[in-house]
Image (cartoon, grey):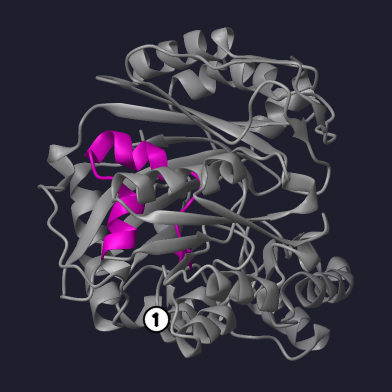
Amino acid sequence: MFKKVLIANRGEIAMRILRACRMLGIRTVAIHSTADDEALHVRFADEAVCVGPADAAKSYLNVPAIIAAAEVTNADAIHPGYGFLSENAAFAELCRKCRLTFIGPTPEAMRQWGDKVTSRTNAAKFGLPLLPGTGVLADADEAAARAAEIGFPVILKASGGGGGRGMRIVRNADEIHRGFETCRHEAQVGFKNPDVYLERYVEEPRHIEFQVLADHHGGIWTLGERECSLQRRHQKVVEEAPSPAMTNELRASLGEKIRNAIGSTGYTSLGTLEFLMDERKNLYFMEMNTRVQVEHPVTEMTTGVDLVEMQIRAAAGEKLQLADTRPWSFRGHAIECRINAEDPKTFAPWPGKITSYHPPGGGGVRVDSGIYGGFRVPPNYDALLAKVIVHAPTREEAMQKMRVALDEFIIDGIRTNIPLHIALLNEPAVIAGDMSTRTIERVVARGF
């Protein structure tokens, strides 16, 4: 097992990794920018190193400074969390060269599954269903020709993208050239990779993802699925497990194909395969995220598996021992709400000082956060403040427990999206489990 892990992230995920390390008896190093001098993960880590100014490009993405911080503190591993450097194969490769364990998949596996075009090829090889689409497009003229073959609407996507960025919906031929150039520019700026591809666009899809875990000894587990349809501009807002749209038969059939794909490509870590479900309940593979997901707690609550601990153990070379995680062994229902520092109606970011903070509690209620009363939320990073996760025997009970938890949650001094979450939990379509990726759009348009 590792003796010391450097956490190359911030906020709630840094705290989540820190707790897992402490439970395993591992010492921790927190890196931080000058904007995060008073951050919670900095306070609780055994050591802390400032790696640069507030600008993420000069701190949390400052590879030389992060590697240097690991070396001067004698860390033997780096956990990247999500975002930032978590899916950067070149960074994982550099860690290997510097004799630091990257807590995640190998650079080779990351390239194989992290690139969307390559992962589509993998998916097709192992029988995972795909929407009609293309490989990397040479130019806008090829995009127009292929879109005409597939049929509008289509969606243009950055091959190396993630987090809902680098995507453009195109509904007719007049939009394809401008959409291609815009998407290509965003891909280059955001991911240093201008490659773009397209696939058929589903108007009212559900977004369902499957959690996988693999070790270096041939152990491969699928730990069920998460429903992530409640999202705005491709950014998830509410997640739950299991999905109200899934059956044990579909879950088992797809799980077998996923395990075969993961095993055959030598993948060894946590990972998430994302799918779209159309109106006829057909599932189509979209992409794989080669890291821990923001929404991992709902899977933890319904399986009893500490995913971050397992990810660390797998990276350390341990042979994992998991309890039965077949579909029928899952326990109850879990829901997660992402609490963001933003105006609930305009969605404008709302940084500032938190004047008072009172998280909800009680049985089956969990709050993952990196904030506290008096903490000043910086304007430089993602708006995520905290995640409220609840667990109950049934979906109906979990939804009521979440309503109570949100009503108890006090974050004063800034605005948050808690009112939006309350509106969603009282939306008839959500209550019925009949939502799509456009549900939030309708709730916001109607007003709440």
On the question of residue 212 being in view, the answer is no
Q: Quadrant of the N terminus?
A: bottom left
Q: At which x and y percent is residue 258?
A: 28, 66
> In the image, which residues are magenta?
284-313
| Front position in the image: 275 or 283 | 275
| Front position in the image: 352 or 29 | 29
Quarter of image, res 187? bottom right
Q: At which x and y percent is residue 111?
A: 50, 83
| Element type where label 1 sits in the image | helix
Residue 94 falls left or right of residue 96 = right
Q: Which residue occupies 66% across, 40% down?
A: 39
Residue 158 to residue 224: above or below: below
| Few, some or many residues within 10 Å of mark 1 (<14, 14–19, 20+) | some
Identify which amino acid the numbered label 1 is placed on: Asn
Q: Quadrant of the C terminus?
A: top right
Q: Which residue occupies 82% across, 73% down?
A: 189
Residue 19 falls left or right of residue 444 = left
Q: Which residue occupies 74% across, 91% down?
A: 138
Quarter of image, res 67? bottom right
Q: Which residue occupies 70% across, 86% down?
A: 137
User: Magenta span has 295?
Assistant: yes
Q: At which x and y percent is residue 330?
A: 19, 37
Residue 262 to residue 194: above or below: above
Q: At which x and y percent is residue 136?
A: 64, 86
User: Magenta span has 109?
Assistant: no
Residue 392 falls left or right of residue 97 = left
| Front position in the image: 420 or 106 | 106
On the question of residue 273 being in view, the answer is yes
Residue 390 to residue 323: above or below: above
Residue located beneath label 1 in the image: 122
